Image: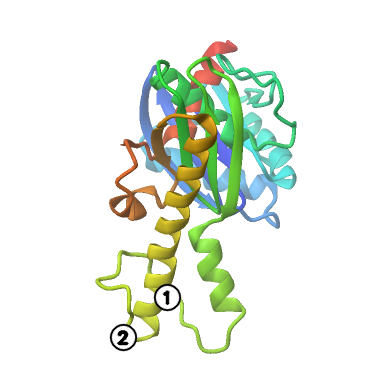
Amino acid sequence: MLLVVDIGNTHVVMGLYKEEQLVATWRIYSDQKKTSDEYAVIVERIIRQKGFKCEEVKRGVISSVVPNLTRSFQKVIYTLTAVDPLMVSHATAPGIVLESIPPQLGYDLLANAVAAHSKWPNGNCVIIDFGTALTFTIVSKEGQLLGAAIAPGLLTAVNSLFHNTAQIPQVSLDIPVRAIGRDSDESIKSGIMFGYAGLVKELLKRIEEEVGERLFVVATGGLSSTIAPLLTQVDSIEPHLTLEGLKIIANATK
């Protein structure tokens, strides 16, 4: 089996592939204070709870945007499986051309581009990832990664509002019934959900104007299914697109 690991600023998302099938997924909080040994205990327990054994894992691949956790999870995978994981980099992007893309571009965005170009090779795509950051990654039908746009994610905005104001409550993120809220809860939901839907629509409009045609729009990330009903432009919702990209990268570098 293949263990795929996507280390983000808020969560570490992990998955197990048996051949080409994603058979298990889970996420844990990104805690830079935890040691690799502590993470190893957590990951081993989850793998067992999913009905598998660490000995079944023969390969691993890691994408990380948190340098302090990268080495920890390299150790975790080696400790549990005796496997040195593949580390995603600009040199491990099958089918993607990176002529003018800076090395600082997140490897999660690279994995998204790999997966989208593999699934929809005949069209220009934009991948919208609703994570800690809201990211737009544009890849052409020729496989060229044209660039990206990045904004604060929905939860990042909500948490900032909650922590930096005295009387703003934390709210669940679901679609409000009206734009004009009747209380704080409704008002925040309206501002965040309708506001971010507007942000996405405007950025998509500008991106498509620059590319010169309508793009195939893919939504992914933890909140993609929550906000997608407000976005008629979305052609496909792919919750595990990043993990799929990691699998493709791993298979291309066996």
Q: In this view of the protein, which residue sits in the foreground, 43 or 248?
A: 248
Q: Is residue 194 visible?
A: yes
Give the position of the N terminus as an image quadrant.
Answer: top left
Q: Position of residue 14 (x, y in %)?
A: 49, 38
Disc 1 residue crowd, few under 14, some 14–19, many 20+, Cα 10 Å: many
Q: Point out residue 60 in the picture as x, y percentages from the top left corner.
A: 57, 25
Q: Residues within 10 Å of mark 2 (few under 14, many from 20)?
A: few
Q: Which residue is mark 2?
A: 182
What amino acid is at disc 2? Arg
- Alpha carbons under labels 1 and 2: distance apart: 10 Å
Say which amino acid is labelled 1.
Answer: Ile
Residue sitting at the far left:
177
> According to the image, label 1 marks what residue?
188
Q: Earlier in the sequence, mark 1 or mark 2?
A: 2
From this view, report whether residue 196 is shown above or below residue 21. below
Element type at mark 1: helix
- On the rendered image, what quadrant is the C terminus found in? top right
Q: Residue at x 39, y 63 (%)?
A: 193
Q: Is residue 13 above or below residue 226?
A: above
Q: Are marks 1 and 2 in contact (CB under 8 Å)?
A: no
The foreground one among 113 and 200 is 200
